[in-house]
Image: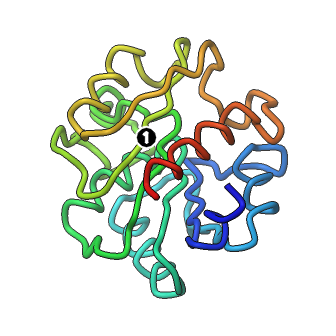
Amino acid sequence: MQDALQLYDFLILPGRGDSGPAHWQSHWHNAFPSSIRVVQDEWERPVYTAWAAKLDDYLTKTTKPVIFIAHSLSTALVMRWSHDADTRNIKGAFLVGPGDRDARDSLPDAPVKGFAPMLLTPLPFPSLVVASRNDPFVDFGRAQAFAVAWGSDFADAGALGHMGNDIDLGFWPQGLLLLGQFLARLA
């Protein structure tokens, strides 16, 4: 894992509401020397086109091949962005807690715009979907279906809710092990 930390730029992509200081993404950002946290202008009422433009901006700051470390809404960002963007420098995506945008974005008062529909076509780079059995934002079977459609590997995280700010995973050693195994498969 230590070698991989030198090989890649890790783009940390928080979900809606950002990842607080106790969130596993924040711990990883602080620990990975070549990580870049993508900071969006609007965390509470995200619009896909603005988030995708910000992702493009941050990608210009990378100097090495890129690994996405995406949580929640940012898994949908990666999914949609990858179908229209230049992905040659993207070496992989670690996608944690994918939300089902089809079920949520169609509501008239939905605060999230433009991330649906969920595209069920292969991603152009290797990926790993990590899902919890009791995630309130996606049915476990639907998360598995996303992984199959995207050509992703799949990891069952057990019953960890949405694996976000609401659960104290700390440094999340299980997730770090999954990331290390994913990076080893890329080498």
Number of marks drawn: 1
Please name whichever residue, 149 or 114, is drawn nearer the observer in this view of the structure.
149
Return the residue nearer the eye: 187 or 150.
187
* Residue ID for mark 1: 128
Residue located at (34% from left, 51% from top): 126
In the depicted structure, whether residue 128 falls above or below residue 74 = above
Q: Secondary structure at mark 1?
A: strand
Identified at 78% across, 32% down, the residue is: 169
| Residue shown at 31% from the left, 26% from the top | 103
Amino acid at the residue labelled 1: Leu
Left of 37 or right of it: where is 29?
Answer: right
Residue occupying image coordinates x 61% and y 46%: 180
Picture coordinates of residue 97, whole percent (x, y): 51, 33
Task: Please state the horizontal and vertical placement of residue 50, each as a whole percent of the image.
Answer: 40, 69
Question: Quick one: quadrant of the N terminus?
Answer: bottom right
State left or right for residue 179 relative to residue 27: left
Give the answer, above or below, for where 153 lies relative to 80: above
* Crowding near the residue tagged with mark 1, few <14, some 14–19, many ≥20 C-alpha atoms within 10 Å: many
The answer to which quarter of the image holds residue 22 is top right
Asked which quadrant contains residue 49, the reply is bottom left
Left or right of residue 18, residue 109 in this image: left
Horizontal side of 16 relative to 34 (left or right) equals left
Q: Where is residue 96? Give x, y as percent.
A: 52, 38
Q: Quadrant of residue 28?
A: bottom right
Q: Could you tell me residue 52's position as x and y percent?
A: 37, 67
Is 180 located above or below residue 130 in the figure? below
What colouring method underlies this structural image? rainbow
